[in-house]
């Protein structure tokens, strides 16, 4: 197994490289192992996908749940894992910093903090949001390995904020020391270009909201890291829903014709 330091170095090199890379989002250890076996060089957790494995809605997991999930994925794979740490599971900067310290103990080597307050259903005031990022960055810098801190500006996704407002927040998070910047909710390549041109940190984009853009097109727009959020989990759940409805409503099992064979799964994992 790769060591934590080796994983941290590998993730840092991916962010510093000239090529864009995909960081797919598994929802459990099994899906993480499959994605690693296929050749992906880094993975990211998905808060929504993980919540659904617990029978909860997105936002329904606790910090303790998330930390256990981070540990399970980090232990299951040799590639670096960066985590969706939602809003840090806290509002105060000190508590967010503590979340980073605890998350770093699980074996992950990166994590994101967003500026959305789920309890108040609001975007944090810019000053408070910056203080939270600063605290997270300081906690990350205290660690004995390079922890990639991603700062997320959620306004485009949560409140349909104009892009200039989102860019201003990303620039403030950059000044606060974030290693990676992320504004989920961008929907065009032109928006990606505008964000990339406005900052000087690696930018993560959410491919599921930019479809049908390809990796090449996203890279040409300047994206460095490409994630897919909960989309893989949704893709896995879709045939379950379809098969369940068929069995319940039609009493038939035609869905069996399309499933992957156990041997194929074993071959991938060998």
Image (cartoon, rainbow, N blue to C red):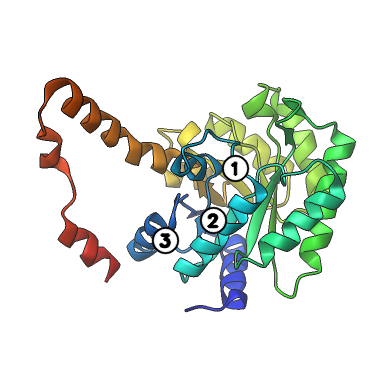
Residue 65: tell me if it is visible: yes
Above or below residue 4? Residue 128 is above
- What residue appears at the point 40 percent right and 33 percent down from the top-left corner? 212
Q: Is residue 234 left or right of residue 140?
A: left
Residue under label 3, please give it: 40
Is the residue under label 1 in contact with that under label 3 (CB below 8 Å)?
Answer: no
Q: Residues within 10 Å of mark 2 (few under 14, many from 20)?
A: many
Above or below residue 11? Residue 200 is above
Is the residue under label 2 in contact with that under label 1 (CB below 8 Å)?
Answer: yes
Residue situated in front as seen by the camera: 197 or 258: 258
Above or below residue 145? Residue 256 is above
Residue 210: tell me if it is visible: no
Please state the horizontal and vertical placement of residue 29, each as a whole percent of the image. Answer: 43, 59
Residue situated in front as seen by the camera: 5 or 167: 5
Residue situated in front as seen by the camera: 230 or 161: 230
- What residue appears at the point 34 percent right and 65 percent down from the top-left corner? 37
Give SS at disc 2.
helix
Residue under label 2, please give it: 69
């Amino acid at each position: 197994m790769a060591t934590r330091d080796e994983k941290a170095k590998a993730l840092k090199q991916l962010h510093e490289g000239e090529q864009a890379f995909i960081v797919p989002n598994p929802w459990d250890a099994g899906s993480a192992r499959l994605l690693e076996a296929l050749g992906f060089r880094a993975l990211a957790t998905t808060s929504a996908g993980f919540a659904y494995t617990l029978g909860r809605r997105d936002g329904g997991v606790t910090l303790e749940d998330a930390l256990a999930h981070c540990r399970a994925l980090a232990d299951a794979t040799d590639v670096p894992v960066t985590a969706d740490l939602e809003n840090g599971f806290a509002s105060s900067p000190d508590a967010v910093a503590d979340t980073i310290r605890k998350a770093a103990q699980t074996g992950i080597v990166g994590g994101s903090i967003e500026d959305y307050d789920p309890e108040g259903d609001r975007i944090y005031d810019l000053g408070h949001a910056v203080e939270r990022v600063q605290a997270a960055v300081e906690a990350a810098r205290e660690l004995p390995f390079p922890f990639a801190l991603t700062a997320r500006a959620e306004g485009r996704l949560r409140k349909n904020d104009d892009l200039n407002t989102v860019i201003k927040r990303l620039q403030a998070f950059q000044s606060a020391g974030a290693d990676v910047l992320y504004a989920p909710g961008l929907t065009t390549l032109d928006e990606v270009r505008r964000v990339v041109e406005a900052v000087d940190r690696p930018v993560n984009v959410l491919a599921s909201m930019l479809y049908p853009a390809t990796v090449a097109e996203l890279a040409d727009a300047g994206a460095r890291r490409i994630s897919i959020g909960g989309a893989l989990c949704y893709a896995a759940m879709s045939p379950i829903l379809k098969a369940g409805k068929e069995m319940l409503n039609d009493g038939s099992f035609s869905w069996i014709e399309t499933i992957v064979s156990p041997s194929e799964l074993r071959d991938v994992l060998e």
